Amino acid sequence: MGWSTASADTTLPDDGAHTVRVALGARAYDVLIGPGLLGKAPSLIDCRIGARRCAVVTDKNVAAWHLGPLEAGLKALGRYAGAVVLEPGEATKSFRELGPLCERLLEMSLERGDLVVALGGGVIGDLAGFAASILRRGVRYVHIPTTLLAQVDSSVGGKTGINTPQGKNLIGTFHQPSLVVTDTAVLTTLPARELRSGYAEVAKYGLIGDAAFFDWLDRNRHLILDHDAVALARAIERSVQMKAEIVARDETEAGERALLNFGHTFAHALEAWTGYSERLLHGEAVALGVCLALRLSEELQLCPAATADRVSAHLEAVGLSTRLSQIPGGDKADAIELVRLMGQDKKVRDGRLTLILARGIGQAFAMPEVDAALVREFLARELKRELHLQPRLPDG
Ligand code: NAD
Ligand code: GLY
């Protein structure tokens, strides 16, 4: 079963936290996973990285709940350089915020040996990690991820960056954190919609490479959404193990790492199309993208019939949308525009798409050289079928 940790470098230290090692040679680091680690983060940083001044980057929502204990702990150790508290939301991952953030960090006299501590979800991790990678040509950073999505995905692997009007994450660096401290208890303050959004990335791991994990999720998804500490920790640990193993083999996405983007080529286009707004959160877009990728795999007779239906039923039971028409305004989506937006994907080569498709649950693979016309026709069929399926109210 997918739970075996035999192949992953996973240990259980005395305090009950699990450790997953991201084995990247000189850039290797640990992901510590367990309840109550936020309060211990200052001493964990001190023990594992050394006595360094720490500048915390966070957002207003996270600061209101969780900055206090971290700040107090860093102050008690004499390591606190200050905090930058940003507006929450995807719009913060921008050039507009990056410049002032870097200047604030310089004003704190953060030196090359000091640390940036990203306390927040994927937005804060991506932005603060990017800032750390360019500040004084690179300072180290620690991530304390506070959303499920960040705990299972964005905090691991060193992809940092910002969005531009041209697309998501098109400006960025690979800059690995020096330590990830994942406190599963901070998820109790996370809004339910954000928890569901992060769940899409958990399911993704089962879908790309561990069918037994997906079966386990099928039986236990309600426990995860109900914040059951054991189920949550298991789901996070298995996800992090899978990501750590893939990243260790392919740090800069020369090949296998692209599998982690299952559903993401569709998802990124949908996020751009909805203006990176509350209309569609990243994980929500991933849930939809995964279903589109599976339906296309079925249409191309790559994967058994009914696979997409099984996954859609699973995600819908979690409360995630699996059809374009379920997004607010989704009935107005246009296949030509969506494929144009998909053309900004980082996996595009000579204008042709590489899509991550599947031969079944747990069997994702990269399909290069996909003709954009084929994807356009597929999306047009999807939209037409959905319009037909949707009960419509008479005008007026
Ligand atoms: P997010 O960082 O915007 O956080 C979601 C919301 O939850 C925000 O409003 C935030 O203030 C709030 N929040 C966070 N933690 C909280 C807590 N514990 N309690 C209460 N509120 C809390 O969103 P996200 O889903 O974590 O991240 C999405 C971003 O991650 C996207 O920009 C995406 O591109 C990026 N991402 C990056 C990678 C990577 O490998 N670098 C991977 C996946 C996604
Ligand atoms: N979230 C995809 C990656 O880290 O490669």
Image (cartoon, grey):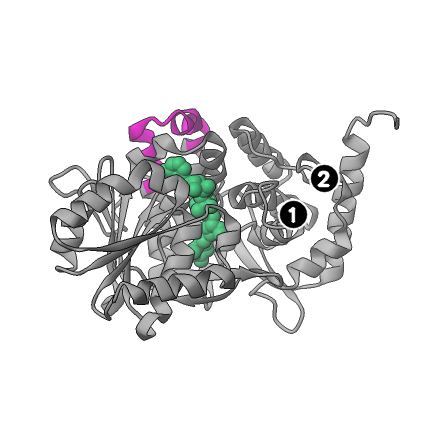
Q: Quadrant of the C terminus?
A: top right
Confirm or reject: label 1 Cβ below 8 Å from ligand 1: no
Q: On screen, 204 above or below 350?
A: above
Confirm or reject: label 2 Cβ below 8 Å from ligand 1: no
Q: Earlier in the sequence, mark 2 or mark 1?
A: 1
Please identify the residue farthest to the front as the structure is shown: 107
Is residue 279 among the parts visible in the rendering?
Answer: yes
Q: On screen, 386 above or below 262?
A: above
According to the image, label 2 marks what residue?
A: 329
Residue 325 drawn in magenta: no
Residue 394 picture location, percent across and down: 87, 25
Q: On screen, 50 above or below 226?
A: below
Q: What secondary structure is found at the residue carrying circle 1?
A: loop
Determine whether, in the image, residue 259 is placed left or right of residue 58: right
Q: Quadrant of the N terminus?
A: top left
| Start-end of magenta stretch | 217-236
For the point 62% across and 51% down, the residue is 266
Amino acid carrying mark 2 in the image: Gly
According to the image, label 1 marks what residue?
A: 274
As measured in the structure, the alpha-carbon distance from the residue carrying label 2 to the one carrying label 1 is: 9 Å
For the point 13% across and 54% down, the residue is 78
Q: Quadrant of residue 323?
A: top right
Residue 220 drawn in magenta: yes
Main SS, magenta residues: helix
For the point 14% across and 43% down, the residue is 13
Is residue 212 among the parts visible in the rendering?
Answer: no
CB contact under 8 Å: marks 2 and 1: yes
Residues 216 and 139: in front is 139
Amino acid carrying mark 1 in the image: Thr
Classed neighbour count for the residue bearing mark 2: other residues with Cα under 10 Å, few (<14), some (14–19), many (≥20): few
Determine whether, in the image, residue 182 is placed left or right of residue 195: left
